[in-house]
């Protein structure tokens, strides 16, 4: 693009030799642009970079309604304690407290994610943020608006956003909870964390999670599950370390549970 533009401008301003000079200048700029695109495509976050991004966005959700709750801090503490060494957990917790005292640009962080993060990294972050918002058993409008903003600015599709929202909006509150790191934990049928039988309400949400309509055929259900499995498979975040991968397995289970409930309601094998 810049090569052609350089030739045109060169010919207008300096005729033949201007066109030659424009060709070389434009080619040089195009070369730089191509290298940047290749770098972005090949970029992989280190675990440290990825966790720092999560902490900044965590702080944004925590401060969304102007009140940082104990349940939210406990959620983060338990997440760090479960997935990292005591020293690392303590250091990251201190970093979060420092971030909470400052005003980081959510827009800048999301732009970085939009340009460099894989869809698997983005979806992992959204799952974590919805889990954080559900830590006290309810969602505030301010929290949902911040998470929606993060999703949109990061380049996550609306269908993917609604899918993850469905994983937590119903199962993260009310009579049934799948919250992974402490905080609120409901119960079903008298047993904490019990697996609920399919109902019209849960099944409607399960279809949203798989990003299909209840009218989908059995074959379409299977196809949707395979597509979702590719997005959420723990192996897709292997490069972020074993700790993140293990946590991704639990998040992957949410989608699997929706598929199993749909299969059961249809009598599918």
Image: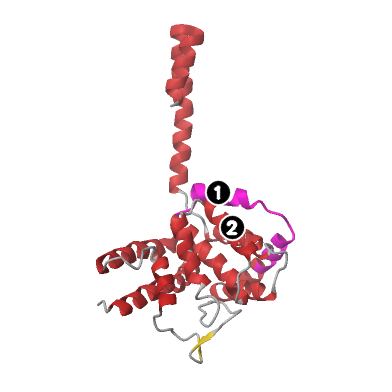
Magenta residues, start to end: 93-118
Q: Residue at x 58, y 79 (%)?
A: 182
Q: Is residue 34 magenta?
A: no
Q: Is residue 269 left or right of residue 77?
A: left
For residue 64, the mark is none
Q: Residue at x 56, y 48 (%)?
A: 111
Give 183 or 196, whichever is nearer the viewer: 196
Magenta span main SS: helix
Q: Are the residues at dot 1 and dot 2 in contact (C-beta closer than 8 Å)? A: yes
Q: Quadrant of residue 69?
A: bottom right
Q: Position of residue 160 (x, y in %)?
A: 45, 59
For residue 53, the mark is 2
Q: Quadrant of the C terminus?
A: bottom left
Residue at disc 1, secondary structure: helix
Q: Residue at x 32, y 79 (%)?
A: 265
Residue most extreme to the bottom: 190
Whether residue 234 is visible to the viewer of this picture, yes or no, is no
């Amino acid at each position: 693009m810049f090569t052609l533009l350089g030739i045109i401008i060169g010919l207008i301003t300096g005729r033949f030799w201007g066109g030659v000079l424009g060709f070389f200048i434009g080619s040089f700029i195009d070369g730089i642009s191509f290298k940047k695109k290749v770098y972005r495509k090949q970029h992989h976050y280190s675990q440290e970079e990825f966790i720092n991004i999560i902490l900044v966005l965590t702080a944004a959700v925590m401060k969304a309604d102007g009140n940082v709750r104990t349940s939210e801090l406990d959620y983060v503490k338990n997440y760090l304690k479960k997935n990292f060494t005591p020293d690392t957990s303590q250091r990251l917790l201190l970093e979060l407290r420092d971030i909470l005292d400052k005003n980081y640009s959510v827009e800048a962080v999301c732009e970085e994610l939009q340009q460099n993060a894989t869809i698997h990294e983005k979806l992992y972050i959204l799952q974590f943020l919805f889990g954080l918002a559900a830590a006290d058993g309810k969602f505030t409008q301010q929290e949902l608006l911040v998470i929606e903003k993060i999703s949109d600015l990061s380049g996550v599709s609306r269908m993917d956003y609604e899918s993850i929202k469905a994983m937590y909006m119903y199962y993260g509150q009310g009579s049934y909870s799948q919250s992974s790191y402490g905080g609120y934990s409901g119960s079903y049928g008298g047993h904490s964390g019990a697996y609920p039988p399919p109902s019209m309400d849960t099944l409607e949400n399960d279809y949203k999670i798989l990003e299909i309509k209840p009218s989908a055929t059995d074959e379409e259900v299977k196809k949707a599950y395979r597509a979702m499995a590719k997005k959420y498979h723990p192996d897709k975040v292997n490069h972020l370390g074993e700790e993140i991968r293990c946590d991704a397995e639990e998040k992957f289970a949410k989608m699997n549970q929706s598929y199993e409930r749909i299969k059961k309601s249809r009598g599918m094998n």
